[in-house]
Image (cartoon, helix red, strand yellow):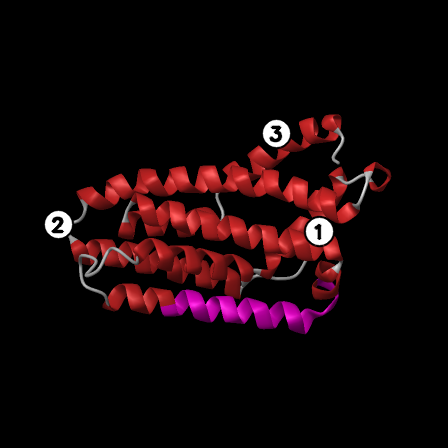
Amino acid sequence: MVDPLTLLAFVPAALALNLTPGADMMFCLGQGMRFGPRASVAASAGVALGGMVHVTLAGLGLGAVVAALPWAFDVIRWIGVGYLLWLAVQTWRSSGAAANPVPAPKSAFRSGLIVNLTNPKVILFVLAFVPQFVVPEAGPVLLQFLMLGSVLSLGGLIINALVGVFASGLGRRMVGGGQALRWISSGIFVALAARLAVLERT
């Protein structure tokens, strides 16, 4: 189990990180603007699940392997770039209003998961941040990783979802201008792809 004092120190640090705008938050914002609050919540859930996968890998020690192999980092990174650009093209080619809004949450969840998993910077961040709060003497390291990761992912789930829900209100006001909404949503995906393309290992 995680020491209560350690957890008490971890929660505000995790909250501060969750409140820092990043690729995950921007993705959920774009989903909210495009498809509405349900899609933004689903996208945030996908991102949170992806974060837990990264935390599990880090706890198992696989993150260190990724950090030590530049080619693995680059392969994952360029897959992410390609996927984000594909999302940008699909968003631009879609109609001004969602033709079938029912499957949007499922699609948003899947996209959020993929976007998070194909960002190798996340697992490097987890390796740099979470171990500072892991105390080997307190119990199994993997269990501590999972508990701390759950706190981090839960905070991200709530904050990113709220950002997307807020953005969905703006999207509804812009629904009459479907072309503008497509421009904004596609632009977000392109910007995220560009950001990931120029990412360097640290």
Q: Earlier in the sequence, mark 2 or mark 3?
A: 3
Q: Secondary structure at mark 2?
A: loop
Q: Which residue is mark 2?
A: 176
Label 3 CA crowd tier, 10 Å (few <14, some 14–19, many 20+): few
Relative image position of residue 99 (x, y in whole percent): 19, 61
Q: Within the image, what quadrant is residue 168 found in?
A: top left
Location of residue 56 with respect to 156 vertically, above or below = below
Secondary structure under the numbered disc 1 in the rendered image = helix
Q: Position of residue 81 (x, y in %)?
A: 48, 67
Quarter of the picture containing the C terminus is bottom right
Residue drawn at 31 percent across, 43 percent down: 37
Figure quadrant of the N terminus: top right
Query: Which residue is drawn at the image coordinates 68% and 57% (left, top)?
Result: 57
Query: Gap in Å between the C-alphas at discs 2 and 3?
Result: 41 Å
Expressed as whole percent of the image width and height from the top left, the position of residue 146 reads 67, 45
Region in magenta? 67-86
- Disc 3, SS: helix
Q: Are marks 2 and 1 in contact (CB under 8 Å)?
A: no
The residue tagged 3 is 12
Q: What label does residue 127 carry, if any?
A: 1
Total tally of numbered discs in the picture: 3
Q: Of marks 2 and 1, which one's residue comes earlier in the chain?
A: 1
The kind of residue tagged 2 is Gly
Query: 103 left or right of 3?
Result: left
Q: CA distance from mark 2 to mark 1?
A: 45 Å
Mark positioned earlier in the residue sequence (1 or 3)? 3
* Amino acid type, mark 1: Leu
Q: Which mark is residue 29?
A: none
Are there few (<14), some (14-19), or many (20+) residues within 10 Å of tag 2? Answer: few
Indicate yes or no whether the magenta region holds residue 79. Answer: yes
